[in-house]
Amino acid sequence: MFTLNKYANSQVLNEELTARIVNDLKQAIEKKGHASIAVSGGKTPIPLFTLLSQQDLEWNRVYITLVDDRWVDDTDDASNEKLVMTYLLQNKAKFANFVGLKNSCDNPFDGAEVTEQILDKVPMPFDVLILGMGEDGHTASLFPGADNLKLGLDMHSNRKVIGMTPLTAPLDRITLTLPIILGSKNIYLHLIGESKIKVLEQAEKGTDVNQMPIRAVLQQDKANVVGFWAPR
């Protein structure tokens, strides 16, 4: 179940999405005493992270992790962990509890089991999960045609994370699986740019998830997914 909210520009979008996220996290803290959020990397969420970091929230009760990451050191510019540390875990949000996906194993396939144990520190299901989408129709690090894609989309795998070698992008990755993504309480798809709306429209028209894995998120009846899009 997918609905799309359209905004005049990314500033308005980011303000609205930030308000939604803060409200979701506050409600979770009031109900359970803690909250959890999984975020994606890339350039799109940087202004969102900056705005979110300035919000009044009991950040010491919030657990933050990643939807996916490249299997590189956290000092590497390609690291989503570095991105989050630089833009989100700042200002008021510096008191949040961050749990990364990368560990000391040589590759994400060997490291996935270790990461699953590390993620036991993060309360699940996530109260908020933010996805992005690539021009190739990937989301998280669920990439089209990849050898491990079927396992990543398997709703009965009992896996939290898997390793992934993309065919359409460099570097091995580690990613949350589809059941963990769709198990989240509030799922937001964050998109900026005219090219992204065209990819989204293409994804909505077809059904082949191997060709465009984002379809597994858009065309399902287990969770509500809300899209946030602006042209620039």
Image: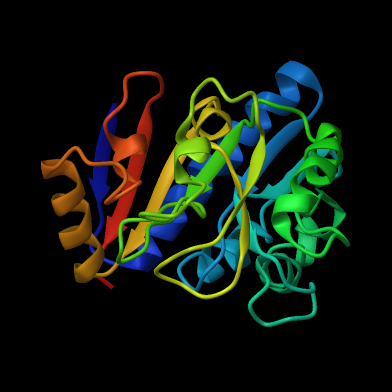
Place residue 92 in its image quadrant. bottom right
Q: Looking at the rendering, in which quadrant would you find the N terminus?
A: top left
Tell me the quarter of the picture where residue 220 sits.
top left
The foreground one among 34 and 189 is 189
Q: Residue furthest left?
A: 205
Q: Position of residue 187 (x, y in %)?
A: 47, 36
Q: Residue at position x 72%, y 65% from top?
A: 81
> Along the horizontal axis of the image, is 17 left or right of 206?
right
The residue at the point 27 percent across, 51 percent down is 211
Q: Position of residue 212 (x, y in %)?
A: 29, 50
Q: Residue furthest front?
A: 147
The coloring applied to the image is: rainbow
Depth check: 40 or 23 in front? 40
User: Is residue 201 left or right of 120 when viewed as pictured?
Assistant: left
Q: Residue at x 32, y 19 (%)?
A: 221
Q: How many marks?
A: 0
Taking the spot 64% from the left edge, 23% from the top edge, the residue there is: 158
Percent x, y of residue 99: 81, 50
Quadrant in which residue 134 is drawn: bottom left
Say which quadrant the C terminus sits in. Answer: bottom left
Q: Is residue 1 above or below residue 48?
A: above
Across and down, in percent, residue 161 comes to 66, 41
Looking at the image, residue 97 sits to the left or right of residue 127; the answer is: right
